[in-house]
Each structure stands twice: as C-alpha cells, then as structure tokens.
Amino acid sequence: MLTARLVDRLLDDSYSTETRRHVLALTTARLTANACFRFAPPFLASISDDFDISLSRLGLALMITELAMGASPLLGSFVDRMRRRSAMTGGLLGISAAAVVTASSPNVWIFIVGILMISVAKFFFDIGLSAWVNDHVLYEQRGRVIGITETSWALGLLVGVTVMGLVASQTSWRWGYAVGAGAVGLMALVIGARLERHDVAGSTRQHDAVRTPMPRPGYLVVAAMFFLMASSQAMFVTFGPWLDDEFGFSEAGIAAVAFGLGAFELLASVTSARRTDAWGKERSAMAGAMLIAPAGVLLAVLHTQQVPGLLMLGLFLLGFEFAIVSLLPLAANLIPDAPGRGLGIVLAGGMLGRASMSVVATATYDRFGIEVPALVGACLALCMIVCLMIFSRDSRS
C-alpha cells in the first residue's frame, strides 16, 4: 500500500502500468549495484594501505579498468539483442560475483579484475534498464522516469556506501564488499521474479537496429559526457584521501561524509526528475555543470577549512548529479532504434574521461593536494557546457 501511494505521487496514470509497477524495484536494484560500484573511491587510502602501494599507483590501476570499458559500444550492441530481463538480472548476478572476487582479492591485480568485472556487469544492467525505459516510456516523459531511477546513484552513496563503510570501519573494506555482494544478489532474484519474461510489443530489441550509425552531432554529447565524468572523477578519487590527510578522518568518518554527500546528490536527482522534461535536457545538464565550476574553484581556495570545504564538495557533486541525470535521457535517444548502442557510445566517452582523470587526479593529489584536482574539475565542467551549447545550436538549425 505504501509503495503504491509513493508511485502515485511520482507517476500519474499517463505512464504505463508496467512502468508504475516496476520502477521502484528497479531503482532499488540499481541502488545496490551503484553501492558496489561507488564503494572503492572514498576508501582508496585504506585499500592502498592494505596492498602497500601508493595512491597514484592505485589510480593507475583504476585507469586500466576504465580503459577496458571503452568496449562499451560493443557491449551496448550486444545488450540491444538481449531480452531486457536477462540483461538486468544477468548484470546484477555478475556484480554480486565480482564483488566477492574483489572482497577476497589477495593482491591489487585481482582487486582490479574484480573492479573491472563490477563495471562490466553494471554496464549490462544499466543498458538493459535504459532500454527497458525506452520500451515503456515516451521520450517526452523519460526525464521523470530516468530521474527516479537515477536517485539510485545518490542513494547508492547515501545508503549503500554508508552501510558498507560502517561495516568496513568495524572490520575491513573487504567485508564492506561482501555485504554489497549479498544485497545485489538478493535484488537479482527479486528482479528476475518480477519482470515479464518477454519484452513488450514494439521493443527496439532487433537484430538490425544495432547497425544504425551515430548521427554526427551526437558525438558532441559523447564529448560532453567525457568532460562531465572526468570532472566528477577528479573529486571521487581524491575526497577520501583529502579527508584522511587534511582532517584525520577515519573510515567511519568518511562513511558519514558519504552519507551527507549522498543527501546532496539525492536532492539533485529529485529536482532533475521534476524539472528536466520542462526545462529541456541540454539546458538542465548545463545548469548542473554551471554549479560544478564555482564549487571546484572555491574548494581549491577553502580546502584547509573543514566545514566550508565539505560544503563546496557537496555542491560540486550536487551539480554533477543534476547534470548526469539530465544528460542520460538525451544520450539514450541519440540512436532511437538502438538505444543501447547510442547510450553505450556516450558512456564509453564517460569511461575514457574517468580513466584519464583516475591517473591525473591521484598523481596531482599526491604532489599538490586537492587544490589541483578541484581546479581541473571546474575547468572540465566548463568544457562540457561548451559542447552542449554547440549541440543545442546544431540541433535547432
């Protein structure tokens, strides 16, 4: 009853019955997946100490996993041929297994294999979910539905990473991953039992769809995703070590900060879900990036002051979350007949952005502190705005 009332508040009767029935379960499943995916960056200092390596070397290892995800357009084409339920349940089971590998890794290389497996499996789930939304929701209404499912990114930090971090503070980061593996495995069973075995009539899952080329202006969206994800990675891989080095935060303290940052991101997700369709996808994404730029500059200036620094970090991630939630429905519609491939190409750009910044941010942090990563993140957000401005102009013309 409570779930039905919540759905009624979020989605009216203009949305399909299937969408209203399953959106909360899918969001919860994605929450657990995102928690496993997002757990490592805040605790890189603890992980690097466990493996007795430097933060910059661990950043280089993380870059390898991101570069390997450059194959995501090929994976997107493959997922386009799969049934939506198969892609999502298979992805969730893969994340659960990969989290077990990560938790039990005897050295950094097995750890990286586990992280890579989490990324690949999560990609299967995310593309399957995006294609499922495309099948069930009109483009004009997708901003709200994707906004709801994207709250799982913030909730993955707010709830998932916080719980996993508290477990880690009492045991080790390995048990944090073990808890995540159990939660994702449970949601795989739930999604497998709830979703229909067959796709809806009119589904874009067809053999020839994946051959549709990306329109040329679409590569501006790819570039925008590159800059946006690189900007966010500059903070994601450095804020945990910054809190540890500058203020002496423990794992429990970092988990508490993750909870607060998740609240900022959740605010952005909810606002985007309500406003993106009305404001427009490009304009909303640019608005988020416009918040990132000044927040990054002010964080570089105020990095030695705990409360102002944390506030700027929260605003930085709030802007990122608003921008990414607004950009995803645009990315998924670049190739309407093959949403998985279109989104896969855009996400590949994002993965390359994350890969490059995993090395740059950790290396510059080791040498200069968080000031340089914060300023680089601000500049990258401005580059993202330029890309979307050109895309909007070309689309109108």
Image (cartoon, grey):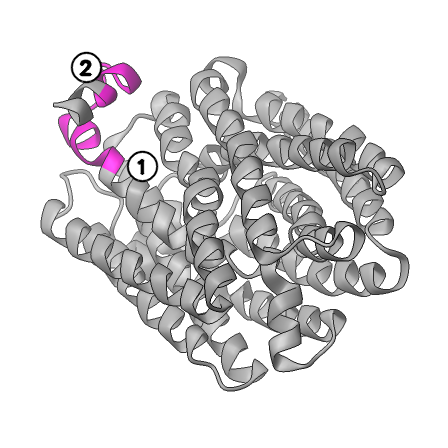
Give the magenta range: 6-24
Q: Quadrant of the C terminus?
A: top right
Q: Nearer the viewer, mark 2 or mark 1?
A: 2
**Measured from the top left, where is residue 394 in percent x and y?**
65, 28
Q: Residues within 10 Å of mark 1 (few under 14, many from 20)?
A: many
> In the figure, 33 relative to 324: above or below?
below
User: Front-most of 337 and 89?
Assistant: 89
Q: Residue at x 48, y 13 (%)?
A: 278
The overriding secondary structure of the stretch rendered in magenta is helix
Q: Which mark is residue 13?
A: 2
**Measured from the top left, where is residue 51 in percent x and y?**
62, 80
| Residue 192 among those drawn in magenta | no
Q: Residues within 10 Å of mark 2 (few under 14, many from 20)?
A: few
Q: Secondary structure at mark 2?
A: loop
For mark 1, what is the residue?
134
Q: Amino acid at mark 1?
A: Asn
Q: Residue at x 50, y 83 (%)?
A: 110
Q: Residue at x 13, y 39 (%)?
A: 201
> In the figure, 37 relative to 380: above or below?
below
